[in-house]
Amino acid sequence: MATDLSLESRRRDNRRHPMMQQDGYWLETDVAAEYFDTLCEWIELLKSGLCWTGDSQVGKSTCIKNIARRIRDEYPDVAVTLISGERSCNRPNQDRFLKNCLEQTRRTSVGRGESLCARMTNHLINECGAVRGRIMVLFLDEGQAFLPEEYDALRSVWNRMNMQGYALLVYTVGNDELLANASREDVSGRHGNVGRFFVKFSNFNGITSEGSLSRILEQFDTGLTYPNAQWPYTRYFAQAAFDKQWRLADESTGLHRALLRMKGATAPSSDFTGWCMGPLLKSVHAMLKDALLTEGYDPSRTPVDWHEILERHAEAHLLCRRI
C-alpha cells in the first residue's frame, strides 16, 4: 500500500529529502561505472598509480566517495581511505603533510616516540587489520595540490608497508595540473614516485551525450526513492505530473538543447569533455523543487523552460570548459 504523503507535508519537510542534502544520494554515471570496473581490475592485480583528471565541478570528489563505499562492499577485506590535497603557502614539509593525512583519517592516538612516517604506516596497517586484510586502497582527491616532497613522504609509507607484507594502492583524481605534476616528477628523477602514483592517466568526463543525460534523469524516476519505493524522487516533488505519466527522463531532449543554447552551440565538438554534474544537478533540483512549491505548476501541462532554469541556477562557464 502506498504511503500517503500529503502535499503540505512534502512542502514542509522537503529540506529533509536526500536530494536536498550534501552527498544525500548517488547517481550512477557512465564514467563512474567505467572508473569502478577499472579500479576493481587494478585492485585484484595489486596495481597502484591510476589517475583520473577532469574539470572542476564535473563530479570527481562525489564519485570517489561513493566508489569508496562500493569497494568496501565489493571487497570487505580491503581497507579504504580518502585524503584530500590542500595547498599551503608554507614551504614543502613531509612531516606537515603526514600530520595532515593523519588528521584527515581521524587518527587520534599515536605511539610515543614514533616518527610521523611510522605513525602513518602503522595507522594504515591497523586499518587493514580492522578488515582482516593486507590491502589498503588510498584515494587522493585534489591530487594536483600535492607537492613532490609530499609524494616522497607517501613513497616512504608505501615502502614501509610493502616491507611488512601490505599493499598500498594509490589512486588519484584531480584537474589537468596533475598531468604537469607527473611530468615534473619524471623530469626531476623521482621515478619511484611515477611508478607508484602516476602509472596511467584517464579522462574523467562529464555527461557527454543526450543519451547519458537521459539515463541520469531516469534514475530520479525509478531507482532513487524516498521515503519508500512508492515515492521516486520525481514523484515526491511532482506527484500530480508523475501520476499522469510525466517523467523527468522525458525532459532530456529539452534540457540538452537548453545546455547547448547556454553555450551558444548547436552540437558538441569532437573535443567536448561533457557537462559538469555540479551545476547541472543544481538546475534539476531547482526544477523539481519549483514543481513542489509553486502553486498550480504542473510540468506535465506546462513545458519546462530549461533555458530559464539554467540561467537562474547554473553559471555557463561552469557547465563545461569547452564545447
Image (spheres, rainbow, N blue to C red):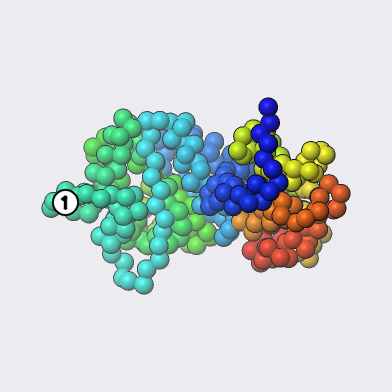
Q: Residue furthest bottom?
A: 89
Residue beneath the point at 45% across and 53% down:
141
Residue 310, picture quadrant: bottom right
Quadrant where the N terminus sits is: top right
- Taking depth in this image into account, of 103 and 148 the one nearest to the observer is 103
From the viewer's side, name the closer residue of 5 and 252. 5
Q: Residue furthest left?
A: 113
- Residue at figure coordinates x 48%, y 49% from the top left: 51
State the quadrant of the C terminus: bottom right
Look at 32% across and 50% down and name the residue there.
106
- In the rendered image, residue 318, in percent from the top left (x then y), is placed at 64, 63
The residue nearer to you, when weighing 241 against 209, is 241
- Tell me if 275 is positioned left or right of 67 in this view: right
Q: Residues within 10 Å of mark 1 (few under 14, many from 20)?
A: few
Q: Is residue 182 visible?
A: no
Task: Choose top left, top right, bottom left or bottom right for residue 96.
Answer: bottom left
**Residue 152 percent across, percent down from the top left:** 31, 56
Which of the 4 quarters of the picture holds residue 182?
Answer: bottom left
Picture coordinates of residue 265, whole percent (x, y)? 79, 62
Say which residue appears at 40% left-offset and 30% top-offset.
Answer: 76
The picture places residue 18, in percent across and down from the top left corner, at 57, 46
Classify 190 as above or below 231.
Answer: below
Q: What residue type is disc 1 on?
A: Glu
SS category of the residue bearing label 1: loop
Residue pointed to by mark 1: 114
